[in-house]
Amino acid sequence: MTTFYFVRHGKTENNAEGLFNGGTVDSPLIESGVEATKRMGKHLANIQFDLALTSPQMRAQTTAKIILEENPTPPELTIIEDLREMRLGDWDGKKIDQITAAYPEDLKNYRTRPDLFDAEKFHAESYENLIARSTKVIQDVAETHPEAKILVVSHGILLMALLNTLKGIPLAKIRESGIVDNSSLTILDYSKEKRIFKSWGQMF
């Protein structure tokens, strides 16, 4: 089985300010995000990663680099476009409370019924596309690295959608368990036949 170490990026300025932090915006990690990621890096320092994959967005790349700095023999960091956060179109970078007030039903569907969310209305990416592109990354890597240890640094919505889908949870219910925290770790042993979650959203 391939062991995946899924990490959500450290807390950013956009997270702290209550802004939508999707696939077309970025902001730096704040101090608490850096410190939490360093703690994770120390926890993972003795893991011999065969691959380290990251979203192209700088908040994810920064998080990955902080983790790998603690590793005595880190692999080269590989940027994977399909690990980019869900593109939120007109909502990206906007205040969450403003969108909540302006589009209460759409926001409700976005947060509680992904199967009903009308992404096209806001020039956003659909959950279906997000899941298709992210699961393909995992399937392809597992096929080419069947016994490897893989670090994957990505984003809250992507990881929520991807991991719950890998659990076998249907689209309508993938948000029921919430989003993993910033600088959290989820470990999955994966093969075509079997998925075993060894941890979920662990903090350090």
Image: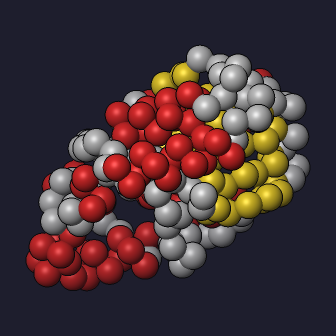
Can the viewer see residue 143 in this picture?
A: no
Say which quarter of the image contains residue 44. Answer: top right
Q: Indicate whether 89 appears above or below 147.
A: below
Instruction: Give the residue displayed 32% in from the left and 80% down from the top.
Output: 108
Query: What quarter of the picture does the C terminus occupy?
Result: bottom right
The front one of 188 and 34 is 34
Scheme of colours in the image: secondary structure
Closest to the observer, 129 or 195: 195
State the residue at coordinates (84%, 44%). Answer: 191
Residue at 51% across / 47% down in the picture? 37
Judging depth in this view, the residue of 70 and 74 nearest the camera is: 70
Residue 20 location (% of width, % of height): 25, 59
Q: In the rendered image, is residue 44 in sight? A: yes
Q: Position of residue 43 (x, y in %)?
A: 68, 46
Task: Measuring from the top left, give residue 52's x and y in whole percent.
Answer: 62, 28
The x, y position of residue 171, in whole percent, is 55, 68
Number of marks in the rendered image: 0
Up-down relation of residue 171 to residue 77 (above or below): below
Q: Is residue 51 above or below residue 202?
A: above
On screen, residue 111 above or below 10: below
Q: Residue at 37% x, 40% y: name it.
A: 59
In the rendered structure, the answer to whether residue 203 lies left or right of residue 82 reads right
User: Image check: 114 left or right of 198?
Assistant: left
- The quadrant holding residue 147 is top right
- Quadrant into which the N terminus falls: top right
Viewer-nearest residue: 90 or 132: 90
